[in-house]
Amino acid sequence: MTKSNIDGRLRIAVVIGSVRKPRLADSLAAWLECELTAIDWLDLDMIDLATVSLPMHEIQPGGAATSPIGDRLANADGFVFLTPEYNHSFPAPVKNVIDWHYTEWAYKPVAFVGYGSSGGIRAVEQLRTIFPELRATTVREAVLIPMAWEHLDADGRFVPPPGTAQALHATMNELRTWARALRPVRIPDLAGRR
Ligand SMILES: Cc1cc2nc3c(=O)[nH]c(=O)nc-3n(C[C@H](O)[C@H](O)[C@H](O)COP(=O)(O)O)c2cc1C
């Protein structure tokens, strides 16, 4: 449970799913951070998986006992996954961070910003099948950015195509609705470890 009250601000964690060097995610994350920082009802935590050590051999059923980002995930009221599409799915580090944790996801909403040739739709739709196992719900609205690499300016900054900002705000509004609605049931005992 977070310290914020029922009418208070929400803590939203953005998980950056690509860890490649270089990566398009840098341009998209910078845009996303700028957009989300301007939203007055949320406090933002940008979690860059490229900067977090989550060795796959330490994965445990029900989540690891300690995690370098466990507190940050636990304190979040909701999540936004920024995910590219790799081979018609999401990148391995995204599954890794999901599997590393368990109670941290429970009774929280998860939204998606996908990108790829088809907007990352296959990555996003596959992620939707996973989160119910973690007792998390996914947000219907989503931001899907086809050919995102075609929308960079000369300095590599992402210049969103028409409709992208509107999709983001619709997604964030639904995330807020779910985050507030689920707050009363976000009781650690109910999300017990396996
Ligand atoms: C291993 C790999 C597989 C990919 N497969 C797909 C794919 O199936 N569908 C798609 O739309 N894009 C695919 N792409 C293109 C990525 O969506 C694109 O390169 C994107 O910019 C990657 O994001 P990143 O640079 O932030 O890692 C693939 C890229 C990589 C590296």
Image (spheres, rainbow, N blue to C red):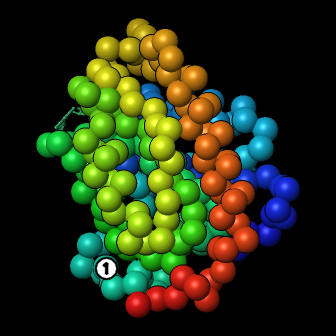
Q: Is residue 193 above or below residue 17?
A: below
Q: Residue furthest left?
A: 87
Quarter holding the N terminus?
Answer: bottom right
- Whether residue 47 is visible here, answered yes or no, is no
Residue 14: x percent and y percent? 53, 49
Q: Return the x and y of residue 61 as percentages of the image width and height.
A: 33, 85
| Residue located at (49% from left, 12% from top) | 162
On screen, 38 above or below 100?
above
Q: Dot 1 corresponds to which residue?
A: 59
Is 168 placed above or below 153 here? below
Residue drawn at (32%, 29%), measured in percent from left and top? 119
Callout 1: SS:
loop
Q: Is residue 126 visible?
A: yes
Please state the horizontal and vertical placement of residue 163, each as a whole percent of the image: 50, 17
Q: On the rendered image, what quadrant is the C terminus found in?
A: bottom left
Q: Is residue 183 left or right of residue 97?
A: right
Horizontal relation, residue 154 to residue 171: left or right: left
* Residue sitting at x 14%, y 43%: 87
Residue 85 sits in quarter: top left
